[in-house]
Image (cartoon, rainbow, N blue to C red):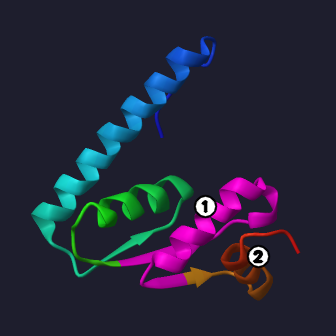
Amino acid sequence: MFRVDRSNKFSAFSSMAKNFLRAFLFIRKEIEYFKPDSVISMLIEADILTYFVKRSGLKFNHICSERNDPSRRNKYVRKFLGHIYKKANYFICQGGKSCRLLLRGTKE
């Protein structure tokens, strides 16, 4: 999404936080302006940003679409995404095993 210099850990964290906030405010502004019935998020970053935008008070249907193999992610990311997917209005997944893995949040 955004390029971050990872040589200094604090600098990298602050840069990532600033980029996240900038993206959050941009997406929130666009959703407020267009007032869509539904928002489909197809990437991890988009899922997380859209989740927080919806939690900030905007009303829309959040449709999460998982296109990757969740077993390649660490267990904390899987648990967090599982929480987001449970809170979404709709969840689209490529396969049954992937859906079970994400919605449970643990490794099978």
Q: x, y (%) of residue 3?
A: 50, 27
Q: x, y (%) of residue 22?
A: 30, 38
Tell me the residue at 61%/19% (across/down): 6
The answer to which quarter of the image holds residue 89 is: bottom left
- The amino acid sitting under disc 2 is Leu
Q: Residues within 10 Å of mark 2 (few under 14, many from 20)?
A: some
Residue on which the image places disc 2: 101
Query: Does 77 appear in magenta?
Result: yes
Query: In front: 19, or 42?
Result: 19
Query: Does 68 appear in magenta?
Result: yes
Label placed on residue 18: none
Query: In front: 58, or 26?
Result: 58
The magenta region covers: 62-91
Residue on which the image places disc 1: 80
| Residue 5 in sight here | no
Q: Is residue 7 left or right of residue 74?
A: left
| Residue 26 in sight here | yes
Q: x, y (%) of residue 90?
A: 46, 85
How many numbered tags mark residues here?
2
The answer to which quarter of the image holds residue 86 is: bottom right
- Determine the secondary structure under disc 1: helix
- The amino acid sitting under disc 1 is Phe
- Determine the secondary structure under disc 2: helix
